[in-house]
Amino acid sequence: MAVATPGAAPPVGERFPDLDLPDHTGRARSLSEVAGGDPLALVFSRGWWCPKEQRYMRELAGLQDEFEVAYARIAVVSVDPPEVQAAFRAGLGARFVFLSDADRRWLPRLGLLEEADEIHHPYRPTAFSLFPDLTVHAAWAGDWYWGRPTMEELRLAMRDISRAVRSDWDLD
């Protein structure tokens, strides 16, 4: 099993840190609370201002109905302040949680700084599928748009996790 290094996001098989950040309403939330015992698609976003993020978030919003009925969750982390996230979320029609790292407390710890952007200093677009205990199932680096997980890849990741953690998955 790979070992996480300081200042780097954990590799597959390691637990993701239980982030403690305000959500889009400003309420303090932990990542484990957001997961609520379900598989979680955790997406790190540059922010509302990026056209690539706008496109990708619209796709995620289109997937939320499936996640809800399949007992899986979606969470997005960006450096946007909660009020900006709330407006972006409402514009998308999203019901999933946005977490704000506007103070950039977790950004250096996770090593996910988008180094090419010296204006916004945002997160590098990255996505993780997490087991309910926050163990990393899969990770995607989305610096380039095609590096992000497709909606089908997220579906398949949630299926793999559900198959592994749900005792009633098989007919046995």
Image (cartoon, grey):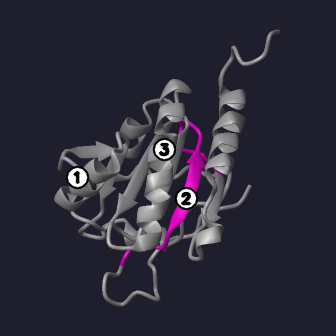
Spatial CA distance of label 3 from label 2 is: 17 Å
Q: Position of residue 57 (x, y in %)?
A: 44, 56
Quarter location, residue 104: bottom left
Q: Position of residue 164 (x, y in %)?
A: 71, 30
Q: Position of residue 5 (x, y in %)?
A: 58, 69
Q: Is residue 136 magenta?
A: yes
Q: Which mark is residue 62?
A: 3
Spatial CA distance of label 2 from label 1 is: 21 Å
Q: Which mark is residue 86?
A: 1
Spatial CA distance of label 1 from label 3 is: 18 Å
Residue 23 seen in the figure: no
Q: Magenta part of the protein: which range?
A: 122-137
Q: Residue at 38% across / 39% down in the picture?
A: 34
Q: Is residue 88 magenta?
A: no
Q: Secondary structure at mark 3?
A: helix
State the residue lying farthest toward the top. Answer: 172
In the image, residue 136 sits, relative to residue 7, either above or below, namely above
Q: Which mark is residue 127?
A: 2
Which quadrant: the N terminus?
A: bottom right
Q: Secondary structure at mark 2?
A: strand
